Amino acid sequence: GDVVLTPSPYYGSYKRDVEARADCVLAPFPSDDGVPSVAQLDAAVSPNTKALLLASPHNPCGRVFTEDELRRCVDWTRDRGLQLVVDEVFALSVFPGVDFCSALDVLDASQSNDHVHVVYSAAKDLALSGYRVGAILTRNSAIFDCVSAVGAFCAASTPAQALVAQLCADDAWLEDVWIPALRERLPPARRGAE
């Protein structure tokens, strides 16, 4: 079947998402804390490979991709005609002093970027896992149409959507209260887990 590459270690639910839901094969490959080198990508790719699935910040390692690392993955997938899915559900959950860079920030407007798809969820950064509110950002109309068709049957409730929209619209609360508090809690939580 079709193969989806992902650097290991990886978030355990990716296997279920890729294999049970998408009927593909998840193919983990060795990486440096979830960030693959070109050599590691080249060693992992096969004729059946259709996509590369990344997480930034990485789950479970917590490593945030740099602009160069993201650009390398965007270019590598484009050059091989592969899809790139970047899971950014922990985008706001970075340690103090670490800058988050989205895959969307490194796209070259002079190149085709229809192969890049970013997923986000209110579950992690906004601590709303039960609300089941997420988003996909893509310029690929075929992907958008498929997600829209499925979304008609499994959309989040209207109250949940309204609440998340209200939270996301409150820039002052997000930037001055929530995000700083979230980032201050990360180092003690990590020390407690070690």
Image: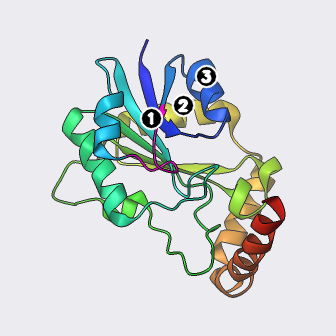
- Cα distance, mark 2 to mark 1? 6 Å
93 displayed left or right of 4: right
Q: Is residue 38 magenta?
A: no
Residue 143 lies, with reference to residue 50, above or below; the image says below
Residue 38 lies, with reference to residue 90, above or below; the image says above
In terms of image quadrants, where is residue 104?
bottom left
Amino acid, disc 1: Asp
135 displayed left or right of 113: right
Amino acid, disc 3: Arg
Kindly identify the residue that appears in the image at 69 percent across and 34 percent down.
Answer: 154
Q: Is residue 35 magenta?
A: yes
Q: Which residue is mark 3?
A: 21
Kindly identify the residue that appears in the image at 61 percent across and 22 percent down.
Answer: 21
In terms of image quadrants, where is residue 42?
top left
Q: Which residue is mark 2?
A: 149
**Which quadrant of the figure contains the C terminus?**
bottom right
Amino acid, disc 2: Ala
Q: Which residue is mark 1?
A: 145
Closer to the observer: label 2 or label 3?
Answer: 3
The reply to whether the C-beta atoms of the residues labelled 2 and 1 are less than 8 Å apart is yes
Q: Secondary structure at mark 2?
A: helix
